[in-house]
Amino acid sequence: MTLPLREELRGIEPYGAPQLDVPVALNVNENPYGPSEAVVADVAAAVASVTGTLNRYPDREFTALRVALADYLGHGVAPEHVWAANGSNEVMLQILQAFGGPGRVAVSFAPTYSMYPEYARDASTGWVVGHREDDFSLDVEHALAVIAEHRPTVVLLPSPNNPTGTALPLDTVKAVCAAAPGVVVIDEAYGEFRRTGTPSALELLASTPNLIVSRTMSKAFALAGARLGYLAASTEICDALRVVRLPYHLSAVTQAVAGVALRHADELLARVDDLRAERDATVSWLREQGLEVADSDANFCLFGRFEDRHAVWQGLLDQGVLIRETGPDGWLRVSVGTPEEMAAFKAALLEVLGR
Ligand code: PMP
């Protein structure tokens, strides 16, 4: 029988980077530093303590976790301004479910995160994509023109952007929020990695009712395996998301693990400074090799340009270094790993370039 699959899903492969078992994995912007023994012990104790009550559904409103997330975000964010789900991927799908839908349009500007059109498709929302400039910045006039033409109910703007690493100036965020007829999501999945002097959109939250600032514990908190994404927005926006979420979507285990990670925020975030320094060193090194590198405020670098980027990607993989073939043609993206991993990446790249 032919399955009654939705037309727009026919022939589509599931999204995802290859999960290969390689010595040096620098392909999905993970944090290379695993939790310390102290964090492992605390997580294990917290999980043990909820295990005895796993016959019961978890706190549907994840009250304690919302308090801890609000506390971490600061900027006057209260628990009722916080929402969370299983990764910011789920948070953003919920945003599309609540604010998109048939007859409505979501907008972003390419090159950008390749999941955005998937959220739109899955929420039966029209998808319109504008462009970024050659240096991957966003031209405000262009953004406002696209918004005026398509009247999107959701605008998705990552800052820093994936895969380019480009952060948005707050003036751009302000202008887009003022012009947008719907909600504007500033996706700060990599927010903690910004260079000094690039502020968070959280600063605008109190004065901007249609702004949503999305974050994740997958990157800076080194918690990709636990799946915890969250956002800050008005109480009204959070209440709308409560309507579309599945009941008990955040397991008791997830809530406990995320709570422990937040209690260890200082220790986990200390590694962010190391990663930012390693990122800046990687950008400089790649430029010294005569390559083009996008300015990066994230934990990865987009570099190029290669006539045959696939050959470069494959050449690195043959030496046990997995990076990501993504972004505009000719470019490759490498996540920032430990100094040892970056040394392996550099050696393998020199080999591929025949230097
Ligand atoms: N936003 C951006 C820009 C990302 O690059 C990613 C992950 N690669 C996410 C959101 C989703 O991350 P998670 O679901 O792990 O929170």
Image (spheres, helix red, strand yellow):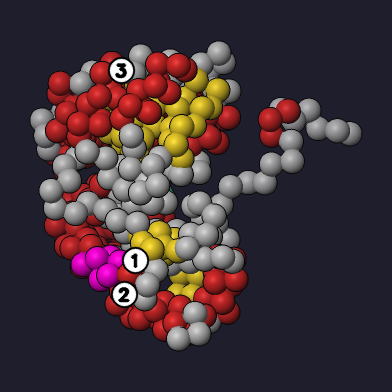
- Residue matched to label 1: 336
- The C terminus lies in quadrant: bottom left
Q: Which residue is drawn at 39% across and 32% down?
A: 156
Going from the N terminus, do you reach mark 3 or mark 1 first?
3
Q: Distance between the residues labelled 2 and 1?
A: 17 Å
In the image, 83 versus 142, the foreground residue is: 142
Going from the N terminus, do you reach mark 3 or mark 2 first?
3
Q: Quadrant of residue 299?
A: bottom left
* Kind of residue indicated by mark 2: Glu
Q: How crowded is mark 1: few (under 14 residues within 10 Å), some or many (20 or more)?
A: many
Q: What is the secondary structure assignment of the residue under circle 2?
A: helix
- Residue matched to label 2: 288
Contact? badges 2 and 1 (CB < 8 Å)? no
Q: Quadrant of residue 158?
A: top left
* Kind of residue indicated by mark 3: Ala
Callout in the foreground (3, 2): 2
